[in-house]
Amino acid sequence: MSQPTPETQESAVPALPGRWERFLDSYLLYSFKRDVIAQLSLLVFIALVAIAVFAPWLAPMNPYDLAQIDILASELPPFWIDGSDPAYWLGTDAQGRDMLSTILYGARVSLVIGFGAVALQAILGVSFGLMAGYLGGRVDAFLMRLADIQLSFSTLMVAIIVGALVKAVFGGAAFSTYAVPLLVIIIGLAEWPQYARTVRASVLAEKSKEYVDAARVMGLRSRRIMFRHVLPNTLSPIFVISTVQIANAIISEAALSFLGLGMPETHPSLGSLIKAGFDYIQSGSWWITLIPGAVLVVLVLSINLLGDWLRDVMNPRLYKG
Amino acid sequence: MALLEVNQLDVRFALRKGDVHALRDINFTLERGERLGIVGESGAGKSVAAFSLLNLIAQPGFIAGGEINFEGKTLNTMSERGLRKVRGNRISMIFQDPMMTLNPVLSIGAQMVESLKAHRRISTRRARAIALEKLRQVQIPSPETRLDQYPHELSGGMRQRIIIAVALLLDPDIIIADEPTTALDVTIQAEIMSLLLNLCEEHNVGLILITHDLGVVSQVTQRMLVMYAGRVIEQGPTREIINDPQHPYTQGLINALPQMATPGEKLNQIRGSMPSLSNLPGGCAFHPRCDFIKRADGRTRPACVEQVPGFVSSGNCRVACHMVAEMQEDRRLKEEESS
Amino acid sequence: MIAFLIKRLFHALLVMFVISIIAFAIQDNLGDPIQQMVGQSVPESEREALREELGLNDSYLTQYLRFAGNAARFDFGYSYIFNQPTTEVIARHLPATLELVAASTFLIIALSIPIGVYSAIKPRAWLTRFFMSVSIVGISIPVFLTAIVLIQLFAIGVSWAPFPADTGWGAWLNDVVSTEGGMPAYGRGDPVPVFGTWETNFASLDGLTYLVLPAISLASIMLPLFIRLIRAEMLEVLQSEYVKFARAKGISMRRVYFLHALKNTMLPVITVGGVQIGTLVAYTILTERVFQWPGMGLMFLDAIQRSDIPLIVTYLMIVGLIFVITNTLVDLIYGLVNPTVKLTGKPA
């Protein structure tokens, strides 16, 4: 933005407490300090994100590099079971890849898709929600009917159908090559209604308040009112559902991959690791599927617990039903 | 023995930071057929008092001490089962907002019949007949059709009539009415109030009327309590208090009535606002707003800031105020000197 | 009520219209019937003639109308992989899915209402804390993972001996933490034929054992959701004035909880339940995949794998129809429970 906005000018005034001081003084931080579960969840979540980000440096081997794979060392159990190899701490999968390394890389893929998809959902959902809530009339009716239909089909169902169609159009090989961006788009398209409905509900609530009337009386343009005045007030519900949505997106990605509509096994996410390992569960090699499964659950659980805590603390008007 | 006797009632709310006193040292009695008003600003503890009589205060509120004696039985130590036999049967309640009081998904008839069946062993047909009779008493238009209607099909005034009918269903000894007309249209407030008054007189039902409206209290009740910040600060016969209020707060309330202001002048109001119960000022809770805190020589009365005032008698009334107590003391000293 | 029904019907038709457009677009762009019918070797001129004959060169509108007309008569063409009318293929797979959904819906309703109500009535009880903790964990486990864990525990079995096996208590504890396995976890077993293509797992004990693990898996994801929803709504309702008034009338707490409060609690729960039916169908695909349950979901995955476009299209249309019907039913139930619906045509 080229011109200085009133907000930046205001925050330049020294008398006002800065964002950091306000944060330190906030109820959010106060209740976080008192909530052990929230602290633990945040710790676990940050740890998982960190090991995913630094996977190339942390992992003992590169699971994408076929040269490093020793097919003779396949289906080795993790360290606490007899017959394990100390070189492979969590054992190996059916192709002889080190489980620890595939899990680190897999968590990385899952998180990238999860965050990417939520970013896309948020952009679509917030824009549509603002449009529906603020403009009302036919735009509102059309967008909300679309959201209704999509939601009644369920977001996962939409993702499965769109995923199936995209795979049919691109063909299996091309789909595998571009799987990450395609999954981001599929899950992003499938889940925008959640954001749109929440944003629309808060816009409608905010719209009836006096400050919006005041802004209109002052002659501000409606787009400006929407982004500068209404949007900031819808942020807390957006923030709260974002946590839930990241968990949902990660689960959706895992589900798609499990059905063979997601990440290929050569470039696995946690979901495709579970799928790959499932075929070997009958032969007793449960770790190939259940260890990545446990990591997925811990990741999703930490996000859900954080989301629960945020919902309790911020208590926003969430769209019900 | 009075029908209802409240002794030293003490109600607290268990909050994380510790208990907050919602009511302290509440004492009053109610005779059969008597009408008592409880007056005060919102937050003074009137509704808590009403709900605590039947032990219906919501968590985290609880009765921490005192006694509520009804027909010689102590209600606050009674079992839930025993209390249930009193609730709605011997003592019934009328709530503030008729739009919220009736269950939206149950028919009027169902909500009346269940009340009767909870306390008497009668057939549904008989219960419906009684319900219909009570609907006639509250002068609802076409009562026959109402039993099968749902609350949303009725106006606020009609719903409050139905709630009054529910309260009368089992011919109770006492009705506790918590701001029964506040949520209604101004035009029908008087109608509902006089209906309630007439029914109470007709059936010799005692009434505890909780309101912030001194006008209504003066028309309906025989005795009244004025509450401030969880305490009673003045109590006695309604007429005496209205005509000659002793406590500065009561005086302020009466002066604030619109009919007390000279036309064209500003309405009188008590400056400031009531403190929150969790953060009461020391001494007399009213002292930060009190005009009598300064003595003739301009010094602040130390007692007002330091000591919680006890009750002194003044005529048939009892007042909790240092100013009144001091003036009476001064008068007594003067009389002693002259004699 | 009539106005309400007409409105619902209109909405249902609109949804089916949108779905049919999508289905038509898929068929038109992805399915090349000529390719499927005659293969590669046929010359272009013959293909063109066939195309003309099948009406594939007509305008989109004409083609769509033909598609919609056929769809209304449940005629969606032939499945490539089964070489049968697609509707027959669906009819053969539908009962398995419906029975699975019925069994888990039963589990969800039978467990979520008592647990949700209990947790709302006794918010501080340790049992409530336990239910709440389990439910947040339950929400975080994807349905296919629950299924895999159940297979490991009850189909394959776990022998675990962390305690000294030579002592009596150690052996006993080892027995407690180990599981036997042996539960069926693959397919439907031998369901009992009822009539037509409908075979049931409900008619025999053996059939029911096949249903146990898949039904629990499918229920596992919805159950915590509904427990939390019912608890949250019930907590809100218990704060309401009408619940206080009901208590002040002296009626029994059982009646206050299970009539006054529960009936109001169920209104939003019914609405959410309607929305969740779609999710349930999506999860049947995952559950059926894990347990090789021969229902519509497994058939759909097969159809995707082998690009059986007519079968995919038929699946979409039938599933869309099921959604529309169930959503309308849910709205009707909502209307029956909520008296304010009847007059105004929508909830007040």
Image: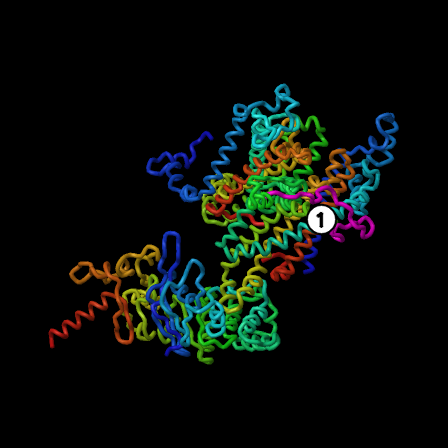
Q: How is the image coloured?
A: rainbow
The total number of labels drawn is: 1
Is residue C202 covered in magenta?
Answer: yes
Which is nearer the eye, A46 or C58? Answer: A46
The residue to which callout 1 is attached is: C209
The magenta segment is: C177-205
The prevailing secondary structure element of the residues shown in magenta is loop
Give percent across and percent down for residue B191.
47, 72
Task: Identify the image quadrant of residue B264.
Answer: bottom left
Q: Residue at x 39, y 58 (%)?
A: B13
Residue type for callout 1:
Thr
Q: Residue at x 31, y 57 (%)?
A: B280
Return the residue nearer the eye: B298 or C237.
C237
Residue at 21 percent across and 61 percent down: it is: B303
Tell which of B65 and C48 is nearer to you.
B65
Is residue A257 in sight in this rendering?
no
Q: Nearer the viewer, residue C56 or A159?
A: A159
Give the answer, above or below, for where C335 lies relative to A158: below
Residue B308 seen in render? yes
Work out which quarter of the rendered image holds the N terminus of chain B and state it: bottom left
- Residue A204 in percent (x, y) is at 53, 48
Q: Is residue B202 above or below residue B213?
A: below
In the displayed structure, B191 sits above or below C101; it is below
Magenta stretch encompasses residue B167: no
Q: Dot 1: within a 10 Å radius of its alpha carbon, few (fewer than 14), some, or many (20 or more) residues? A: some
Please identify the quarter of the rendering in which residue A33 is found. Answer: top left
Where's residue A90, x and y in %? Answer: 57, 30
- In this view, the residue farthest toward the left is B338
Q: Chain of mark 1?
A: C
Q: Position of residue C169 (x, y in %)?
A: 55, 46
- Identify the element where label 1 is drawn: helix
Give the vertical position of C93 relative to B195 (above or below): above
